[in-house]
Image (cartoon, helix red, strand yellow):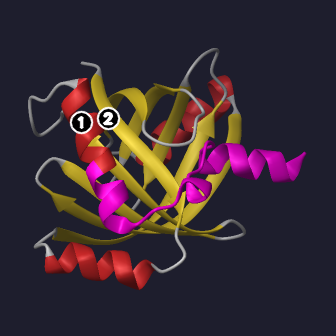
Amino acid sequence: MSLLNVEIKARCNDASLIRKYLLDNNADFKGVDEQTDTYFNVQHGRLKLREGNIENNLIFYERTNQAGPKNSHFNLVKVEDAKGLKEALQKSIGIKVVVQKRREIYYIANVKFHIDEVPGLGEFVEIEAGNVLADLSQQQLNEQCNFYLNEFGIKEEDLMELSYSDMLLAEIK
């Protein structure tokens, strides 16, 4: 089943302000996840295996590179044997890039927030308004995303077009 997120990624100049806002507004803090995202070579979209102490999923998604709120259509599969799956995918289609990050995970209703530290790239905040936990339209999800952009005081110049994988690949070339 394909799901929808409206999401943003932005440089984070002061994670403590965002963290305080989330806690002051009764966000559900899920914890800190040390994540390894392994991206595989695919013909279209993106396929990544996320390995962490909180989240372990195989995720296929299609999303345009643009600053500000963007639609991400995705399929999410929970993974029990990440090591075995990674080995099979590596042998069959090859690894494109690996992203390591430290991620704080919060929720307010159906909106998921990440405060990320990515070695070599810096600190970021992500807002994902999704229809996984609520039956909301694309317009409603977009409105939620924009609401939190304003609440966090995120400036247009801080909005990121690219994924962490694209940023790392650009550094490698």
Q: Residue furthest top?
A: 43
Q: Judge whether residue 50 can be spotted in this image.
A: yes
**Majority SS type along the magenta span:** helix
Foreground tag (1 vs 2): 1
Which is more toward the observer, 70 or 168? Answer: 70
The label on residue 5 is 2
Quick one: label 1, few (<14), some, or many (20+) residues within 10 Å? many
Residue 88 in which image quadrant: top right
| Residue at (52, 60) in percent of width and height | 155
Q: Quadrant of the C terminus?
A: top right
Instruction: Please state the horizontal and vertical placement of residue 106, each as a whole percent of the image.
Output: 25, 65
Left/right of residue 31 with respect to residue 85 in the rendered view: left
| Residue at (50, 28) in percent of width and height | 63
Query: Per the image, is 2 magenta?
Result: no
Amino acid beneath label 2 = Asn
Name the element at disc 1. Answer: helix
Q: Quadrant of the N terminus?
A: top left
- Mark 1–mark 2 CB contact (< 8 Å): yes
Query: Per the image, is 157 magenta?
Result: yes
Instruction: Please state the horizontal and vertical placement of residue 14, each as a whole percent of the image.
Output: 48, 80
Residue 64 in which image quadrant: top right
Task: Please state the extent of the stretch shown in magenta in the rendering.
Answer: 147-173
The label on residue 141 is 1
| Residue at (51, 38) in percent of width and height | 48
Amino acid beneath label 1 = Leu
Left/right of residue 170 with respect to residue 90 in the rendered view: right
Gap in angstroms between the C-alphas marked 1 and 2: 7 Å
Instruction: Please state the horizontal and vertical placement of residue 117, each as a whole percent of the image.
Output: 54, 71
Which is more toward the observer, 38 or 82? Answer: 38
Quick one: label 2, few (<14), some, or many (20+) residues within 10 Å? many
Name the element at disc 2. Answer: strand
